[in-house]
């Protein structure tokens, strides 16, 4: 395939995605399969194709940034958020809390946050910042159309209340929920982070990064939170030695800024 190190530099110049921050074996395997699919011989030829073909570039970024998402993923953690973490946050900061859904993918997560928070706060008072590196998934998120597979874990009361059925397999999020979420493009590895957040949700993303990149991101998340604010991570992403990043464990997968 050619010189992967040179390829990484060229990709960074082109996309501002730093492949050095991703686990190499995993990422290289994904890229090689994409190059083979495009019937391209090597990395140099592929970079040239990315420079001249907008669709190929968008496919590359989408494939690279691994978008797997669903509503109410790991239900027991969402119940913890509803029953323990939101009441804790309301007590500390009042009900007008600032939430950032980082690496939000197709929007399943920030919309779930809005629906669960809607049990405590009128939807018109909810504003969630949702970001992702991939422009294509953000467009899909703003459209808010999902298949029944994405919704399989969502409690029936939320599904019935907040979705319009389009046909046998597709559902659309109602506008009142869409209005709660502001989507924008953001690169966790290089862009400035929102500040004074009460809750940051970043789940099932850190597993793709190197240890060095993770450490940097955890420190930045901590700096983005208010004191005693909460970071909510994915079910395979427990933070080893959270005190190293000025966090302590509030509940499993929920970390409090000390």
Image: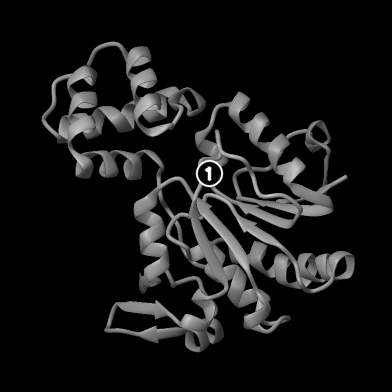
> Which quadrant of the figure has residue 8?
top left
Residue 205 shows in the view:
yes
Above/below status of 50 relative to 229: above
Residue at the farthest left position: 39
**Left or right of 130 on screen, residue 175:** left
How many marks the image carries: the answer is 1
**Left or right of 137 on screen, residue 110:** right
Judging depth in this view, the residue of 31 and 142 nearest the camera is 142
Within 10 Å of disc 1 (Cα), the crowding (few <14, some 14-19, many 20+) is many
Measuring from the top left, give residue 175's x and y in whole percent.
47, 81
Above/below status of 209 relative to 144: above
Residue drawn at point x = 65 percent, y = 66 percent: 78
Measuring from the top left, give residue 202's x and y in whole percent.
60, 50
Residue 72 shows in the view:
no
> Which quadrant of the figure has residue 212?
top right
Measuring from the top left, give residue 172's x and y in whole percent.
38, 78
Q: Name the secondary structure under disc 1.
A: loop
Colour option used: one colour
Residue drawn at point x = 38 percent, y = 13 percent: 5
> Which quadrant of the figure has residue 28?
top left
Above/below status of 159 relative to 86: below
The quadrant of the rendering that contains the N terminus is top left
Residue drawn at point x = 60 percent, y = 73 percent: 114
Measuring from the top left, give residue 178's x and y in whole percent.
49, 75
Judging depth in this view, the residue of 63 and 253 nearest the camera is 63
**Left or right of 29 on screen, residue 159:** right
What residue is disc 1 on?
205
The quadrant of the rendering that contains the C terminus is top right
Residue drawn at point x = 59 percent, y = 60 percent: 129
């Amino acid at each position: 395939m050619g010189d992967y190190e040179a390829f990484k530099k060229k990709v960074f110049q082109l996309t501002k995605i730093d492949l050095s921050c991703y686990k190499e074996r995993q990422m290289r395997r994904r890229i090689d399969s994409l190059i083979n699919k495009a019937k391209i011989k090597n990395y140099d030829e592929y970079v040239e194709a990315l420079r001249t073909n907008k669709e190929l570039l968008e496919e590359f970024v989408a494939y690279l940034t691994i978008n797997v998402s669903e509503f109410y993923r790991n239900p027991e953690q969402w119940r913890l958020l509803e029953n323990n973490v939101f009441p804790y946050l309301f007590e500390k900061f009042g009900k007008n809390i600032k939430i950032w859904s980082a690496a939000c993918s197709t929007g399943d997560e920030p919309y779930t946050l809005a629906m669960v928070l809607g049990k405590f706060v009128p939807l018109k008072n909810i504003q969630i910042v949702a970001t992702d590196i991939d422009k294509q998934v953000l467009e899909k998120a703003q459209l808010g159309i999902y298949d029944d597979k994405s919704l399989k874990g969502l409690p029936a009361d939320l599904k019935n209340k907040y979705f319009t059925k389009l046909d046998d397999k597709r559902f659309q999020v109602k506008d009142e929920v869409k209005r709660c979420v502001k989507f924008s493009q953001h690169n966790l590895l290089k862009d400035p982070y929102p500040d004074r957040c009460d809750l940051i949700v970043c789940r099932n993303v850190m597993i793709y990064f190197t240890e060095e990149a993770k450490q940097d991101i955890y420190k930045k998340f901590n700096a983005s939170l208010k004191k005693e604010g909460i970071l909510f991570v994915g079910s395979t992403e427990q933070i080893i030695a959270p005190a190293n990043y000025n966090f302590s464990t509030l509940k499993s997968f929920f970390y409090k800024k000390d």
